[in-house]
Image: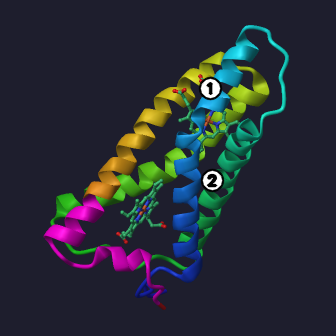
Amino acid sequence: MPAPTGYSRNQIALHWVVFVLIAQQFLFHDAIASAWDRIGEGAEMTFDPLVLAHVAGGALVLLFALWRLGLRARRGAPAPIEGSKLQVAAAKITRGGLYLLMILMPVSGSVAWFGGVQAAAEGHEVLKVVLLALVALHVVGVVYHQFVLRDDTLARMRRAGG
Ligand code: HEM
Ligand code: HEM
Protein backbone atom coordinates (compact mmCIF):
# COMPACT_ATOMS: atom_id res chain seq x y z
CA MET A 1 0.00 0.00 0.00
CA PRO A 2 1.63 3.35 -1.02
CA ALA A 3 2.03 5.93 1.76
CA PRO A 4 -0.70 8.64 1.67
CA THR A 5 0.39 12.17 0.75
CA GLY A 6 -0.92 13.59 4.03
CA TYR A 7 -2.69 12.81 7.30
CA SER A 8 -6.44 12.23 7.01
CA ARG A 9 -9.05 14.58 8.48
CA ASN A 10 -9.62 12.08 11.30
CA GLN A 11 -5.92 11.81 12.09
CA ILE A 12 -5.63 15.61 12.23
CA ALA A 13 -8.78 16.07 14.33
CA LEU A 14 -7.65 13.38 16.78
CA HIS A 15 -4.19 14.98 17.09
CA TRP A 16 -5.63 18.35 18.15
CA VAL A 17 -8.42 16.95 20.35
CA VAL A 18 -5.82 14.90 22.24
CA PHE A 19 -3.59 17.98 22.53
CA VAL A 20 -6.45 19.88 24.22
CA LEU A 21 -7.29 16.91 26.48
CA ILE A 22 -3.68 16.52 27.62
CA ALA A 23 -3.40 20.29 28.21
CA GLN A 24 -6.46 20.19 30.50
CA GLN A 25 -4.99 17.19 32.37
CA PHE A 26 -2.03 19.42 33.28
CA LEU A 27 -3.90 22.71 33.77
CA PHE A 28 -6.45 21.26 36.22
CA HIS A 29 -4.27 18.60 37.89
CA ASP A 30 -4.69 20.21 41.35
CA ALA A 31 -8.17 18.70 41.85
CA ILE A 32 -7.12 15.07 41.35
CA ALA A 33 -3.81 15.53 43.19
CA SER A 34 -5.57 16.90 46.30
CA ALA A 35 -8.39 14.30 46.05
CA TRP A 36 -5.67 11.62 46.00
CA ASP A 37 -4.01 13.15 49.09
CA ARG A 38 -7.36 13.26 50.93
CA ILE A 39 -8.05 9.60 50.10
CA GLY A 40 -4.57 8.78 51.43
CA GLU A 41 -5.51 10.49 54.69
CA GLY A 42 -8.67 8.34 54.87
CA ALA A 43 -11.15 11.16 54.11
CA GLU A 44 -14.57 10.55 52.44
CA MET A 45 -14.62 11.01 48.65
CA THR A 46 -16.84 13.95 47.64
CA PHE A 47 -17.97 14.61 44.06
CA ASP A 48 -15.74 17.03 42.17
CA PRO A 49 -16.36 17.69 38.45
CA LEU A 50 -12.65 18.41 37.89
CA VAL A 51 -11.74 14.98 39.27
CA LEU A 52 -14.29 13.40 36.93
CA ALA A 53 -12.85 15.48 34.05
CA HIS A 54 -9.34 14.12 34.83
CA VAL A 55 -10.52 10.50 34.89
CA ALA A 56 -12.77 10.84 31.79
CA GLY A 57 -10.27 13.04 29.91
CA GLY A 58 -7.49 10.52 30.55
CA ALA A 59 -9.69 7.64 29.43
CA LEU A 60 -10.45 9.51 26.18
CA VAL A 61 -6.72 10.07 25.57
CA LEU A 62 -6.21 6.29 25.80
CA LEU A 63 -9.17 5.54 23.52
CA PHE A 64 -8.06 8.11 20.93
CA ALA A 65 -4.41 6.92 21.03
CA LEU A 66 -5.55 3.37 20.23
CA TRP A 67 -7.81 4.72 17.47
CA ARG A 68 -4.88 6.69 16.01
CA LEU A 69 -2.61 3.65 16.10
CA GLY A 70 -5.36 1.70 14.29
CA LEU A 71 -5.58 4.45 11.65
CA ARG A 72 -1.80 4.46 11.19
CA ALA A 73 -1.81 0.68 10.78
CA ARG A 74 -4.71 0.61 8.30
CA ARG A 75 -4.33 3.85 6.36
CA GLY A 76 -0.72 4.72 7.06
CA ALA A 77 0.88 8.15 7.47
CA PRO A 78 2.71 10.44 5.06
CA ALA A 79 6.40 9.71 4.44
CA PRO A 80 8.62 11.30 7.12
CA ILE A 81 9.89 14.82 6.52
CA GLU A 82 13.32 14.72 4.89
CA GLY A 83 16.30 15.23 7.14
CA SER A 84 19.50 13.56 8.28
CA LYS A 85 19.29 9.95 9.48
CA LEU A 86 19.62 11.27 13.02
CA GLN A 87 16.73 13.74 12.62
CA VAL A 88 14.43 11.09 11.10
CA ALA A 89 15.33 8.67 13.92
CA ALA A 90 14.76 11.36 16.60
CA ALA A 91 11.32 12.17 15.16
CA LYS A 92 10.42 8.47 15.07
CA ILE A 93 11.54 7.89 18.68
CA THR A 94 9.65 10.99 19.89
CA ARG A 95 6.49 9.86 18.09
CA GLY A 96 6.77 6.32 19.51
CA GLY A 97 7.39 7.75 22.98
CA LEU A 98 4.36 10.04 22.73
CA TYR A 99 2.12 7.12 21.76
CA LEU A 100 3.55 5.00 24.59
CA LEU A 101 2.93 7.79 27.12
CA MET A 102 -0.63 8.37 25.83
CA ILE A 103 -1.21 4.72 26.86
CA LEU A 104 0.92 4.50 30.03
CA MET A 105 -0.43 7.72 31.61
CA PRO A 106 -4.09 6.62 31.66
CA VAL A 107 -3.15 3.03 32.61
CA SER A 108 -0.96 4.10 35.58
CA GLY A 109 -3.57 6.70 36.65
CA SER A 110 -6.36 4.10 36.51
CA VAL A 111 -4.39 1.51 38.48
CA ALA A 112 -3.75 4.19 41.14
CA TRP A 113 -7.30 5.56 41.21
CA PHE A 114 -9.39 2.42 40.85
CA GLY A 115 -6.93 0.00 42.46
CA GLY A 116 -5.69 2.32 45.23
CA VAL A 117 -2.07 1.50 44.34
CA GLN A 118 0.35 4.15 45.67
CA ALA A 119 3.25 2.88 43.51
CA ALA A 120 1.14 3.46 40.37
CA ALA A 121 0.46 7.07 41.50
CA GLU A 122 4.21 7.58 41.93
CA GLY A 123 4.79 6.08 38.47
CA HIS A 124 2.09 8.41 37.09
CA GLU A 125 4.00 11.40 38.47
CA VAL A 126 7.30 10.26 36.95
CA LEU A 127 5.64 9.54 33.57
CA LYS A 128 4.10 13.03 33.66
CA VAL A 129 7.61 14.52 33.52
CA VAL A 130 8.64 12.19 30.67
CA LEU A 131 5.49 13.15 28.73
CA LEU A 132 6.19 16.86 29.24
CA ALA A 133 9.78 16.39 28.03
CA LEU A 134 8.65 14.51 24.91
CA VAL A 135 5.97 17.11 24.10
CA ALA A 136 8.61 19.86 24.50
CA LEU A 137 10.98 17.98 22.16
CA HIS A 138 8.15 17.45 19.66
CA VAL A 139 7.16 21.12 19.68
CA VAL A 140 10.80 22.30 19.41
CA GLY A 141 11.17 20.00 16.37
CA VAL A 142 8.04 21.39 14.72
CA VAL A 143 9.01 25.02 15.47
CA TYR A 144 12.54 24.40 14.08
CA HIS A 145 11.09 22.99 10.84
CA GLN A 146 8.46 25.71 10.57
CA PHE A 147 10.53 28.80 11.34
CA VAL A 148 14.18 27.86 10.71
CA LEU A 149 13.96 25.39 7.81
CA ARG A 150 10.69 27.05 6.69
CA ASP A 151 9.33 23.80 5.21
CA ASP A 152 5.75 24.40 6.42
CA THR A 153 5.71 21.26 8.59
CA LEU A 154 2.70 22.63 10.49
CA ALA A 155 0.60 22.33 7.33
CA ARG A 156 0.92 18.54 7.68
CA MET A 157 -1.27 18.74 10.80
CA ARG A 158 -3.62 21.39 9.34
CA ARG A 159 -4.55 20.25 5.85
CA ALA A 160 -5.69 16.71 5.09
CA GLY A 161 -4.06 14.87 2.18
CA GLY A 162 -5.14 11.78 0.26
C1 HEM B 1 -3.10 11.29 29.35
C2 HEM B 1 -3.70 11.08 30.49
C3 HEM B 1 -3.31 11.72 31.79
C4 HEM B 1 -2.46 12.77 32.07
C5 HEM B 1 -1.66 13.61 31.10
C6 HEM B 1 -2.46 12.95 33.51
C7 HEM B 1 -1.74 13.93 34.18
C8 HEM B 1 -1.69 14.08 35.55
C9 HEM B 1 -0.98 15.12 36.26
C10 HEM B 1 -0.18 16.24 35.59
C11 HEM B 1 -1.15 14.91 37.59
C12 HEM B 1 -0.59 15.75 38.76
C13 HEM B 1 0.60 15.08 39.37
C14 HEM B 1 1.22 15.97 40.42
O1 HEM B 1 0.51 16.46 41.30
O2 HEM B 1 2.44 16.17 40.35
C15 HEM B 1 -1.97 13.73 37.73
C16 HEM B 1 -2.33 13.18 38.94
C17 HEM B 1 -3.17 12.09 39.07
N1 HEM B 1 -3.84 11.43 38.05
FE1 HEM B 1 -3.58 11.73 36.08
N2 HEM B 1 -3.30 12.01 34.07
C18 HEM B 1 -3.85 11.26 33.06
C19 HEM B 1 -4.77 10.24 33.19
C20 HEM B 1 -5.30 9.80 34.39
C21 HEM B 1 -6.36 8.81 34.56
C22 HEM B 1 -7.14 8.12 33.41
C23 HEM B 1 -6.54 8.63 35.91
C24 HEM B 1 -7.52 7.76 36.68
C25 HEM B 1 -8.46 7.02 36.16
C26 HEM B 1 -5.60 9.49 36.59
C27 HEM B 1 -5.44 9.57 37.96
C28 HEM B 1 -4.58 10.42 38.61
C29 HEM B 1 -4.38 10.41 40.06
C30 HEM B 1 -5.01 9.45 41.07
C31 HEM B 1 -3.49 11.44 40.35
C32 HEM B 1 -2.93 11.86 41.72
C33 HEM B 1 -1.61 11.17 41.89
C34 HEM B 1 -0.66 11.91 42.80
O3 HEM B 1 -0.82 13.11 43.00
O4 HEM B 1 0.30 11.26 43.24
N3 HEM B 1 -4.86 10.20 35.64
N4 HEM B 1 -2.30 13.25 36.48
C1 HEM C 1 0.01 16.91 23.92
C2 HEM C 1 0.74 17.36 22.95
C3 HEM C 1 1.03 16.61 21.67
C4 HEM C 1 1.06 15.28 21.40
C5 HEM C 1 0.84 14.11 22.38
C6 HEM C 1 1.39 15.12 19.99
C7 HEM C 1 1.53 13.91 19.32
C8 HEM C 1 1.84 13.76 17.99
C9 HEM C 1 2.00 12.49 17.31
C10 HEM C 1 1.87 11.13 17.97
C11 HEM C 1 2.27 12.78 16.01
C12 HEM C 1 2.52 11.77 14.90
C13 HEM C 1 1.38 11.78 13.93
C14 HEM C 1 0.23 10.90 14.30
O1 HEM C 1 0.41 9.70 14.39
O2 HEM C 1 -0.89 11.42 14.51
C15 HEM C 1 2.28 14.21 15.86
C16 HEM C 1 2.52 14.89 14.69
C17 HEM C 1 2.57 16.26 14.56
N1 HEM C 1 2.36 17.19 15.56
FE1 HEM C 1 1.95 16.77 17.48
N2 HEM C 1 1.52 16.37 19.43
C18 HEM C 1 1.31 17.31 20.42
C19 HEM C 1 1.35 18.67 20.30
C20 HEM C 1 1.65 19.35 19.14
C21 HEM C 1 1.76 20.80 19.04
C22 HEM C 1 1.55 21.80 20.20
C23 HEM C 1 2.07 21.06 17.74
C24 HEM C 1 2.32 22.41 17.09
C25 HEM C 1 3.20 23.26 17.55
C26 HEM C 1 2.14 19.79 17.02
C27 HEM C 1 2.39 19.65 15.69
C28 HEM C 1 2.50 18.46 15.03
C29 HEM C 1 2.81 18.34 13.61
C30 HEM C 1 3.04 19.49 12.62
C31 HEM C 1 2.86 16.97 13.32
C32 HEM C 1 3.18 16.32 11.96
C33 HEM C 1 4.66 16.07 11.92
C34 HEM C 1 5.06 15.03 10.91
O3 HEM C 1 4.27 14.61 10.10
O4 HEM C 1 6.21 14.58 11.01
N3 HEM C 1 1.89 18.78 17.92
N4 HEM C 1 2.02 14.80 17.09
Q: Which residue is painted at 71% across and 39% down in the image? A: 50
User: Residue 103 lies in magenta, yes or no?
Assistant: no
First in sequence: mark 2 vs mark 1 = 1
- Asked if marks 2 and 1 touch (Cβ < 8 Å), the reply is no
- For the point 48% across and 85% down, the residue is 160
Total marks placed:
2
Q: Quadrant of ligand 1?
A: top right
Q: Residues within 10 Å of mark 1 (few under 14, many from 20)?
A: few
Image quarter for residue 157? bottom left
Along the viewing direction, whichever of 65 and 54 lies nearer the viewer: 54
Q: Is mark 1 within 8 Å of ligand 1?
A: yes
Q: Is residue 157 magenta?
A: yes
- The amino acid pointed to by label 1 is Ala
Left or right, 38 with respect to 158, comes to: right
> Which of these two is toward me, 162 or 140?
140
**Quadrant in the rendering for residue 25:** top right
- Residue 65, percent from left and from top: 59, 58
Of 90 and 155, the residue lying toward us? 155
Q: Which residue is mark 1?
A: 33
Residue projecting furthest to the bottom: 162
Which residue range is magenta in the image? 141-161
Could you say where residue 53 lies in the image, as x and y percent from the top left? 71, 45
Q: Which residue is mark 2?
A: 61
**Residue positioned 33% across, 57% down in the render:** 139
Q: Residues within 10 Å of mark 2 (few under 14, many from 20)?
A: many
- Image location (x, y in percent) of residue 85: 18, 63
Mark 2 Cβ inside 8 Å of ligand 1: yes
